[in-house]
Image: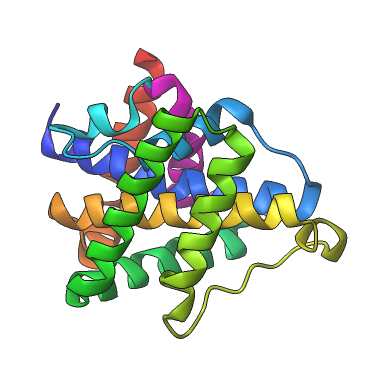
Amino acid sequence: MTIIENQTLALAGIFQSAALIEQLAFKGELNQAAFDCSFDSLFTFDAPTPVDVFGNLAGLSRGLRAAAQYLGGENQQSAKNIAYYVLSMLKISSRLTLNQKMASAIQTGLQTIATQTSDFELSRGSVVSKIDGLYQDTVSTINPRVMVRGEQNYLSNPDNAGKIRVLLLAGIRSAVLWHQLGGSKWNLMISRKKYVRSANQILMRI
């Protein structure tokens, strides 16, 4: 894949988390295949390419569509919230680059969870709970914290809250990847059309 295509996949990972958070917060439901793709990306350590990070790219289609729609300027009611989540995850990933102690704690925590999942055959719910705890012990201590907007009855549900933190961490992981691939806010401003075209081309190949 080209540099633009690889950057597009990383962007799609961020947008997918943002779009799923929006869906869960306002509707209390999730695209399961998309959630699984984001969830699994947290446990792909030392992946050689962005494709390897996300595995089956069909699972990233929600993020590719969200990125193409937002960067293409399509007017959507949820665009403001999605933009806020994307920018928040990008900011946090930048701070983690400067805070190697916390970044290492997150990676070690995820590796520990992966080992426990394998050794003790933990349920998906138990793994979500462990990732939730890891997020609260690390990323949640960074100010300003990400404020999720939505329907209170969905936000107050512990299962939904745990999944939202999983998605935030997955989005931050994609944001770190984006920066590693040379992505920046400047890229987003001057290359929007390239990313939209790239996202649509990848979607056509899925």
Nearer-the-camera pick, 52 or 206:
52
Q: In which quarter of the image is the N terminus?
A: top left
The residue most toward the front is: 120
Classify 66 as above or below 162.
Answer: above
Q: Which residue lies furthest to the bottom in this view?
A: 143
Left or right: where 159 falls relative to 169 = right
Q: In this view, does 195 lie above or below 189?
A: above
Q: Is the magenta stretch mostly helix, strand or loop?
A: helix
Segment tinted magenta in the rendering: 57-76
Q: Please name whichever residue, 121 or 62, is drawn nearer the observer in this view of the structure.
A: 121
> Can residue 163 be seen?
yes
Q: Who's the residue at 44% across and 56% down the image?
A: 169
Which residue is at 49% across, 74% downward?
140
Q: In x, y percent, where is residue 11?
A: 34, 47
The residue shown at (72%, 50%) is 159
Q: How far from the left and from the top, in percent, is residue 178? A: 24, 52
Of 125 and 201, nearer the camera is 125
Q: Is residue 155 left or right of residue 98?
A: right
Q: Which residue occupies 28% across, 55% down?
A: 108
| Residue 138 lies in the magenta-colored region | no
Above or below for 105 versus 112: below
**Residue 18 appears in the picture as rendered:** no
Image x and y of residue 22, in percent: 65, 53
Q: Where is residue 44 in the image (x, y as percent from the top left)?
A: 28, 35
The residue at the far top in this view is 205
Residue 73 lies in the magenta-colored region: yes
How many discs mark residues in the rendered view?
A: 0
